Image: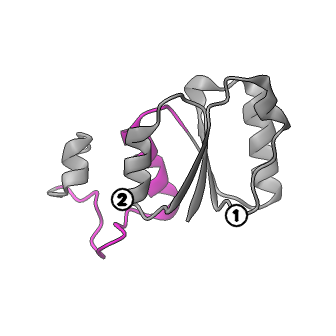
């Protein structure tokens, strides 16, 4: 799955979570400059993630409308790996890429959940 993340400066923890959930290509636009509003969502994108802490209303509206027209699932979240994880699981289901067990069970022993304090 190809994901476009808009907002935030440093998204290394978010990239790690998305990779663990099966996202192969992750494109990041920081959204600091107004020029981001003139960009279009690339054709290969399967999911759009908007980091709400770092985007203004016009930028959010523009990309949400474009994603809606193209039927691209959109996640709006704070810039937090745990928030992204939870929103992704709400949208696509809590399945790990390597197994068929849900990661959000009460007694999950996943290293991913431990490293991001999601238990």
Q: Is residue 83 magenta?
A: yes
Q: Residues within 10 Å of mark 2 (few under 14, many from 20)?
A: some
Against 11, is 34 above or below? above
Q: Which mark is residue 20?
A: 2
Quadrant showing the N terminus? bottom right
Q: Which mark is residue 102?
A: none
| Residue appearing at x 14%, y 57% in the figure | 109
Against 73, is 100 above or below? below
Q: Residues within 10 Å of mark 1 (few under 14, many from 20)?
A: few
Residue position marked by numbered label 1 in the rendering: 44
Distance from the alpha carbon under mark 2 to that under mark 1: 20 Å
Q: Position of residue 64 (x, y in %)?
A: 74, 44
Q: Is residue 22 left or right of residue 75?
A: left
Q: Is residue 10 left or right of residue 96?
A: right
Q: Is residue 3 left or right of residue 79?
A: right
| Residue appearing at x 75%, y 55% in the figure | 42
Q: Is residue 118 magenta?
A: no
In depth, the one of 25 and 67 nearer the eye is 25
Of all residues, the one furthest to the bottom in this rendering is 100
In depth, the one of 1 and 118 nearer the eye is 1
Q: Position of residue 117 (x, y in %)?
A: 23, 39
Q: How many marks?
A: 2
Q: Position of residue 82 (x, y in %)?
A: 36, 41
Secondary structure of the residue carrying numbered label 1: loop
């Amino acid at each position: 799955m190809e994901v476009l993340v808009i907002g935030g400066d440093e998204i290394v923890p978010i990239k790690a979570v998305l990779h663990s959930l099966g996202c192969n290509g992750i494109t990041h636009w920081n959204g600091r400059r107004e020029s981001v509003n003139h960009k279009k969502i690339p054709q290969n994108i399967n999911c759009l993630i908007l980091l709400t802490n770092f985007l203004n209303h016009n930028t959010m509206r523009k990309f949400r409308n474009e994603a809606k027209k193209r039927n691209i699932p959109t996640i709006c979240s704070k810039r937090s790996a745990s928030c992204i994880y939870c929103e992704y699981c709400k949208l696509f289901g809590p399945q790990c890429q390597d197994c068929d067990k849900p990661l959000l069970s009460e007694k999950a022993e996943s290293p991913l959940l431990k490293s991001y304090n999601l238990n």
